[in-house]
Amino acid sequence: LVLQNSPQVRAETRELVRKAMTDLGYFYNRAAANLRMANAGLVGLVINDLRNPFFTEFATSLQMALSARGYAAVVANTDEDPGLQAQVVAAMIEHGVSALIISPAYGEEAATFDAIARAAIPTMQVLRNVEKRTDIFPFAAPDYVGGSRLATEHLLQSGAKRIAFVGGLEGRAVTRERMSGYCGALKKAETEPLVVTGRSSRAFGREAAARLADEHPEVDAAICFNDLVALGMLSGCAEIGRKVGSEFKIVGFDDIEECAQAYPSLTSVHCDIAGFGERIAATVLAWLEEGVVPAPETRTPVELFIRASSRDCPR
C-alpha cells in the first residue's frame, strides 16, 4: 500500500515502511508488479506424484474446473521431493500466482510453507496434511477413515476371516488414517489386524500377494492402501494361481478409472476424484473472489463400489 501511495496508510506508518526499505536496500520493481497483476488469473497446482492416476485424475478435473471460471492452472509435479517442491512453489510465487493448491510431499515443510506465508497467497493443502497451521493453510481430503471402515465391514460381511492391510509407508499420517478405520472395524469384530506396509505401487502389491500366501496362508482378504497396490495384488494372485473373489478377496482405495476395467474388476473405496477436484476449485475461487476462507479441515464423503474382486464369483 505504501508503494502504491495508498491514502489508507497513515503518514507515520508510511515513514516507517520507507525507512525499512532503505535499511534493506529494497527497490520497487514496477515492471514486475505490473506482470504480477497481469497474471492474476493464475492458480498454482503442485502435485506430489502425477505418475499416480489418482493424482492425475484429480489435477485434470481441477484444471478443467478452473478453466471454466476463466482461470489458468500452472501445474508442477514434485515427484515426492520436498526440495523440488520448495523450488517450484518459489517460482510460482515469483510469477504472481493468485492462489496455490498443494498435494504436498513429506519432509522439510517449512521451506515451502513459510515462503507462502510470507507471500500471503491463499493456499490449500489437499489429500495430505503435512503443515499443521491449517488456519493459514486449510486442508481438504476424502474421508479416509470412513472409507477403510466401510471396506473392512464389507469383507467381514462377505465371510473373510483374516484381513490384511497392505501398502502405505509406515509412519505417514495418510497411512495411519487409511488404516485406522480398518483397525477400528477389526477391533469391534474382535479380530487381530495384520499390517504389511510398503511402497504404494503395483510392484509392491504384486510382491505382497506372494508374500502373504507364503508367510500368512490364513489371510483370505486384503484392503490395500490404494488402487495401485490392489491392482498389483491382482497380478500377483494370477501369477501364483490364487483365485481372486472366491479364494482371496481384494479391496482397493480411491477408485481410479482402471478399477472397473481390470479383470477381475476391483472393489474400491470411491472418493469421487472428479467431484473432489471441482469442489476444491470452487472453494479456492470463493476464497479469492469473495473472501470466504475455507474451514481448517474438510472431509468429503466416500462410498464403496463393490465389484468382482470381493465377491464369491469373479465375473
Image (spheres, rainbow, N blue to C red):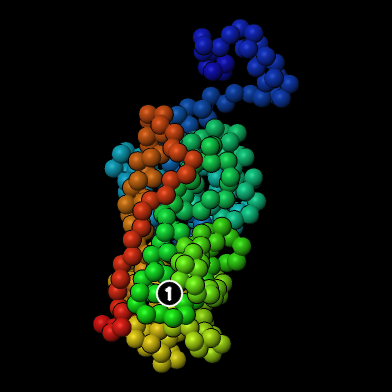
The residue sitting at 30% across, 39% down in the picture is 69
Near-viewer residue (11 or 33): 11
- Number of numbered discs present? 1
Quarter of the picture holding the N terminus: top right
Of residue 187 and residue 150, the one placed in the foreground of this image is 187
The answer to whether residue 4 is above or below residue 147 is above
Helix, strand or loop at mark 1: helix
Q: Does 8 appear above or below 190?
A: above
Q: Residue furthest top?
A: 11
Q: Looking at the picture, how far across and down is residue 301, in whole percent?
A: 36, 53
Quarter of the figure with the C terminus: bottom left
Residue 31 pos. (x, y %): 52, 27
Q: Crowding near pointer 1: few (<14 within 10 Å), some, many (20+)?
A: many
Q: Position of residue 207 (x, y in %)?
A: 52, 82
What residue is pinned by disc 1? 230
What residue is shown at x 39% (from left), y 69% (from top)?
Answer: 153
The answer to whether 14 is drawn above or below residue 264 in the figure is above
View extreme (right): residue: 23
Q: Residue at x 40, y 80 (%)?
A: 160
Identity, as a three-letter code, of the amino acid under mark 1? Ala
Left of 47 or right of it: where is 57?
left
In front of the other: 222 or 19:
222
Name which residue lies at 58% across and 36% down.
117
Instruction: Give coordinates of residue 193: x percent, y percent.
Output: 53, 73
Q: Is residue 116 above or below residue 126?
A: above
Residue 46 in view, yes or no: no
Frontmost residue, 91 versus 172: 172
